[in-house]
Amino acid sequence: MFQGDHNVNHHSSLKKKPINTRLLAIAFTGFCPFLAMYVTQPLLPEFRRVFHATAAEVSLTVSATTIAVALSAPFIGLFADSLGRKRIICGAIFALSVPMFLTATASGLRTLIGWRFIQGLFIPGIFTVTLAYISEEWAGAGVGAAMAAYVSGNVFGSVSGRVIAGVVTAHLGWRWAFIILGCLLLVSGMLTSRWLPASQHFVPHKDSLASIRAIFKHLRNLQLFAIYSVGFNILFVFTAVFTYITFYLAAAPFHLGSVALGFMFLVNLFGAVVMPIAGRWIDQFGYRIAVVCANTVSCMGVILTLWPNLWIVLVGLSLCSAGVFVCNSAATSYLGIAAGHSRSSAAGLYVASYYIGGSVGAVLPGFIWTIGGWSACVALIVGIQLLTTSIALAFWQSKLSILSRRP
C-alpha cells in the first residue's frame, strides 16, 4: 500500500471516530436518567412487605421522582439556555449519583421517598438539555438517528437499573442495589464527560425574562401543546404499565419474585432493537404517522397482558415498550422543529409534561387498581392512548407540510 493511501485511510478513520463517540455519549445521556428513574419498580412488592405499606404508598417511590422532575424541568431549561449544554449534562449526572448513594441509608419509607424526590431534581439537567443539544448539533440532519441513539440509551438504562435492583435485592438486600447503581452513574458521568463534544451551535440567551416569555409563547403554540400532550401520554403509559404489572405478576397465577420481576424488564430491550430502524422510518415517513402507529402497537400490547399466560404477557409488554419508545423518539424529534428558538425552554416544558404524566401514571392507577385490578388499569391506559393519538392527528403537521416550511 502506498504511503499516501495509508494517510488517506488513517485520516478517514479519524473523521469517523468522533461521530461514533458522539452518538455513544448521547446514548449514555439517555442511559443515566432512566437508570435511576424506575429502579424501585421491581422492588415494590418487597417494599410493601418490609415497610408494611399499601401498593399506593410504595408506588410513591416512583412518583416522588417523577414529580420532582416535572417541577424542576422548566427551570433547568432556562439555565441551559444561558449557561450551555455539556457542563449541565455532565454535572447533573455526577450530582444524581449522590442521592442514589444516600437512598441506601434510608431508615424508613418516608426517608426513602425523600431521597427519591431529590434524585428527580437532577434528572432534567440530563434529559432536558440533551434534547436541546441534539436539536442544535444535528441541525435537523439525521436527528431521527441521533434521537434513536438517545432513546436506545433510555431503554438500556431502564432495563439495567431494574434488573440490577431485582437481582441485587434478592442476594444482598435493597440497600446494596442503590450503592451499585450509584457507582454506575459515576462511571457513566466520566465517560460522558470524555466523549460528549462541546456545543458548536449553541447561542446563549442571557435575558432570563425573554426565556420566561418564551415559555408562555410555547404554551400558546398548538403544535407544541399537542407534543406536550403526547409526552404526558408516553410516560403515563410507561409508568402505569410497568409499576402495576409488578403487583399483577406477583399474585396468582404468576407468583413472580423480585429477581423474576427484575428480569421481566428485559422486555424493554425489544425497544432498543426497534429504535435504529424506527429512527430511519421516522425520518422517512414523518412524525405524525410514527406516533399513530406506535400508539396502536402499544395499545395492542397492553391488551395482550390481560391473557393469563406469562409468555403472552411478556410479548404484550414488549410491544407496549417498543411503541412507547418509538412514540417518544418521534415526539422529541418533532419538538425541535415546532419549537424554533429557545429550544431548552421548550424541551423543559416537554419534560415537565412528560413527568407529570409519569407522576399521574404512578398514582392514578393505584386507585383504579382497588376498583377493578389490572383489567381496570388496562382500560384506563388504552383510553388515555386513544385520546392522545387523536390530539396528535388533529394538531401535528404532516411530513409534507414540514418540508414545505423549510427553506
Image (tube, helix red, strand yellow):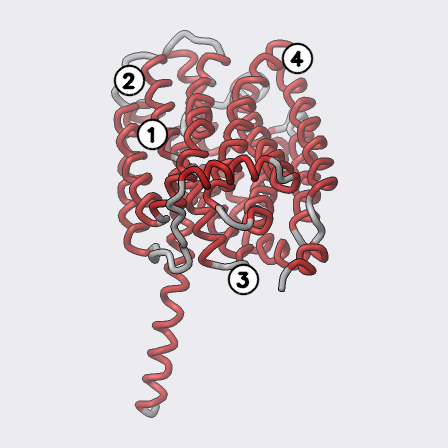
Q: Earlier in the sequence, mark 1 or mark 3?
A: 3
- Asked if residue 179 lies left or right of residue 276, the reply is left
Disc number lying in front (3 or 2): 3
Residues packed near mark 3 inside 10 Å, few (<14), some (14 to 19) or many (20 plus): few
Residues packed near mark 1 inside 10 Å, few (<14), some (14 to 19) or many (20 plus): many
Kind of residue indicated by mark 4: Gly
Kind of residue indicated by mark 1: Val
Asked whether disc 2 touches disc 4, contact meaning CB atoms under 8 Å apart, the reply is no
Question: Which residue in the structure is indicated by mark 3?
Answer: 141
Q: How many angstroms separate mark 3 from mark 2 (CA)?
A: 46 Å
Q: Determine the secondary structure under disc 4.
A: helix
Of 349 and 216, nearer the camera is 216
Of 93 and 248, nearer the camera is 93
Q: Earlier in the sequence, mark 4 or mark 1?
A: 1
Question: x, y (%) of residue 328?
Answer: 57, 42
Question: Which residue in the structure is indicated by mark 4?
Answer: 372
Tell me which corner region of the image, top left, top right, bottom left or bottom right, holds residue 180: top left
- Asked if residue 163 lies left or right of residue 327, the reply is left
Number of the label disc, if any, that sits on residue 67: none
Tell me which corner region of the image, top left, top right, bottom left or bottom right, holds residue 31: top left
Residue 317 in sight from this viewpoint: no
Number of the label disc, if any, that sits on residue 106: 2
Question: x, y (%) of residue 390?
Answer: 73, 36
Q: Earlier in the sequence, mark 2 or mark 1?
A: 2
Asked whether disc 4 touches disc 3, contact meaning CB atoms under 8 Å apart, the reply is no
Q: Earlier in the sequence, mark 3 or mark 2?
A: 2
Q: Quadrant of the C terminus?
A: bottom right
Question: Which residue in the structure is indicated by mark 1?
Answer: 168
Asked whether disc 1 touches disc 3, contact meaning CB atoms under 8 Å apart, the reply is no
Q: Determine the secondary structure under disc 2.
A: loop
Disc number lying in front (2 or 4): 2
